[in-house]
Image: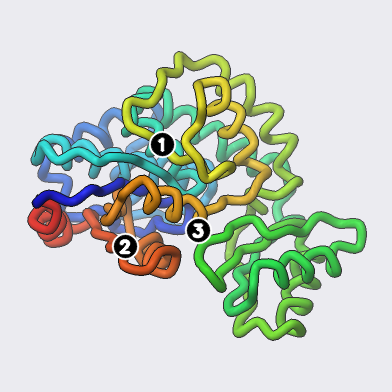
Amino acid sequence: MSVTFAFVFPGQGSQSLGMLSGMEQHSAVAETYAEASEVLGYDLWALTQTGPEAVLNQTDKTQPAILTASIALWRYWQAETALAPAAVAGHSLGEYSALVAAGSLSFAEAVALVERRGQLMQQAVPAGEGGMAAVLGLEDADVMAACDEASQGQVVSAVNFNAPGQVVIAGASEAVARAVEACKARGAKRAMSLPVSVPSHCALMRPAAERFAESVSALNWQTPKIPLVQNVTAAIPADLTQLKQDLLAQLYSPVRWVESIVTLSQQGITDLVECGPGKVLSGLNKRCVKGIVTHNLDTPEAFAATRVALA
């Protein structure tokens, strides 16, 4: 009996030098990287394989790199099997990979769009003025209360509800530092700064969203052919207008990942396929809904095992 599965696409932080190494022999992978390189004006495969790592980790390079790795694997999957997901979702940046997979916009358009997204996010907050931190082992309400207590007129808020007991906060760097201490005082197992230059999904990103609106509205969007659960609402959008509004709001609103996985589960999804580099989502998903299994595609061995498991 076949299983009902969804594809989930990872976001920033899943990149690593050498990602997808060994999979470039497949034409779907090679052609996807060639297409992205043409849009970007540089050799994306070379950057992801040999670096420099500091360049790969720049937001405007990371975002196209993860999108391209994810769509390369998606196309490889389509070339190798007729098995199709019943739904899709993506974590933060991963929502753009999900939109391409669902046929809502073309891959070339998405590559240019996420490069622009990265540039605008970087420009919205000068380097060093924003920060993010991960908080482990604290209830969501306690994290939010700690942020309120630490704000002191500056922005700091809970921005990624990744799994029960795992929340990411973001905002002005000083306020984030105060919130880390406030979370520790409330009994967090761990609270530590993340090595990022952009405080994603908080109110500091509103100017980026306002400038990004022009890029979003310029594209020829299609209604998704596969049900797509969005980050901002943890729901399937009613129409294209709603989809685009949610995509802009996503820049300055929390990623509701736990609720998104619950939504997929309520749609009858029993298995998830992490379609992109790394295994970040695999670790989160199993804590969001008990009994849901996440498979991976980012190595030849994992790809083969997933095909067997879902057949």
Q: Earlier in the sequence, mark 3 or mark 1?
A: 1
Q: Of the residues shown, which amino acid type is indicated by label 1?
A: Leu
Q: How many marks?
A: 3
Q: Of the residues shown, which amino acid type is indicated by label 2?
A: Ile
Where disc 2 sits, the SS reads: loop
- For image coordinates 38% across by 38% down, the residue present is 98
* Residue at mark 3: 258
CB under 8 Å between callouts 3 and 1?
Answer: no
Q: Whole-Å distance between the Cαs marked 2 and 1?
A: 18 Å
Q: Nearer the viewer, residue 125 or 105?
A: 105
10 Å crowding of disc 3: few (<14), some (14-19), many (20+)? many
Q: Whole-Å distance between the Cαs marked 3 and 2?
A: 12 Å
- For image coordinates 48% across by 44% down, the residue present is 93
* Residue at mark 2: 292
CB under 8 Å between callouts 3 and 2?
Answer: no
Q: Nearer the viewer, residue 309 or 114?
A: 309
Structure colour scheme: rainbow
Whether residue 206 is situated above or below residue 186 in the rendered picture: above
Q: Nearer the viewer, residue 180 or 193?
A: 180
- For image coordinates 43% across by 54% down, the residue present is 261
Q: Whole-Å distance between the Cαs marked 3 and 1?
A: 15 Å
* Residue at mark 1: 228
10 Å crowding of disc 1: few (<14), some (14-19), many (20+)? many
Q: At which x and y percent is residue 68?
A: 34, 40
Examine the image and state in which quarter residue 105 appears.
Answer: top left
Dot label at residue 246: none
Q: Earlier in the sequence, mark 2 or mark 1?
A: 1
